[in-house]
Amino acid sequence: MTYTAVRSGFTGPSAHIGGSSDYHIDLKLNESLPIAQRVNALDALARQYKSIGREIEFSNQNVAGARWNPEAGLADKVDLLNRAAGAHAPRPGWQSVDFYVPFAGKSRFDPGAVEGASIYVPAVAGGKVRRGSGGDYGYFSEALSPSGEVLFRVGHGDVRRPEDSTEVAVAGGAVPPSKEEGAESGAPGSKDFLEAAIGTILADAVAGGKLKPPGMPEVKKKDIDENGITRDELYKLQQIKNLQTREQERERIERQGLNQFLSAVDAAKTQMAKASALAQQSFRAPGTTV
């Protein structure tokens, strides 16, 4: 069975996601699916997140900090999935896992790494995605098989930022390659788009597309959505790039300062050597007539 990741909301603070920890995601996988299919579903999510510069980082006890690697061996992935589900409160008939999706190279504790991130649900060709909100699950989605069986649920999305449609049909037939796969084959991928976008545009919002920081040009919604990247994610990528630039500048200044210090030490040594030589020339042995 082939899965494709369908965006279904955004992470948010506890008060707007039905409670629990800020900006985390809860995924439930139907245990009627073979374990290998559940692994494939997580692989599809991980590849989609990778295409927008993010990674799945588990948070429950015993697996906290572990990240899902779609390129790992099946046995390793099965072990991680089972441990992550075992650390979650049991839900009969479901494997439930909690995770965050920080930017690669960042942890869930880094400011700006997980706030307002896209949430995806693994969907099946010929099936559909059904969405809603309420209770202690915040904004949530269910992925149904062509026969109507609920295969996956994802929740704790921000209720203030729902998707436009409450139900989406998933096209049948082959699922197009992800942006990450396209990039590996030499075609323009999302990494190329991000590099170009960061250099030419800035996001126009930091909270649901409604607030515009000073000096930021307007970016049309379609310009972001067509490439699978949200305003929040693009803005945060720009923040990370700015931070990296500042860190590089700080390191340059520190190196420059060190070089100046070493040059001063060398100059002082030279002066001391000259003074010592002059002192030796002026020195006369005892009894010498001046």
Image (spheres, helix red, strand yellow):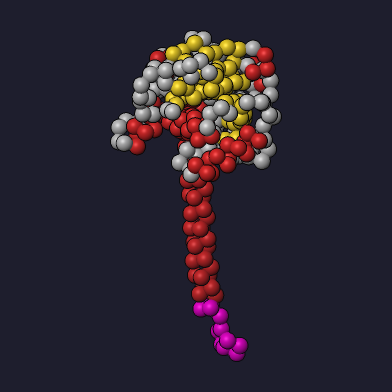
Image-quadrant location for residue 28: top right
Q: In this view, does 269 lie to the left or right of 84?
A: left
In the image, residue 275 sits, relative to residue 61, either above or below, namely below
Q: Does the magenta stretch include residue 282?
A: yes
Residue 184, image x, y percentages? 35, 37
- Depth check: give the residue in front, 253 or 157: 157
Residue 103, image x, y percentages? 51, 33
- Depth check: give the residue in front, 210 or 30: 30
In the image, residue 220 sits, relative to residue 30, either above or below, namely above
Question: Residue at (66%, 26%) from the top-left corner?
Answer: 92
In the image, residue 245 sits, relative to residue 290, either above or below, namely above
Q: Is residue 271 left or right of residue 99?
A: left
Q: In this view, does 283 lie to the left or right of 176?
A: right
> Is residue 53 in view?
no
Classified by dominant secondary structure, the portion drawn in magenta counts as loop
In the image, residue 76 sits, relative to residue 187, either above or below, namely below
Question: Residue at (54%, 34%) from the top-left corner?
Answer: 35
Question: Residue at (35%, 24%) from the top-left corner?
Answer: 174
Q: What stretch is highlighted in magenta?
A: 280-290
> In which quadrant will I find the N terminus?
top left
Q: Does the magenta stretch include residue 171?
A: no
Residue 19, image x, y percentages? 69, 20
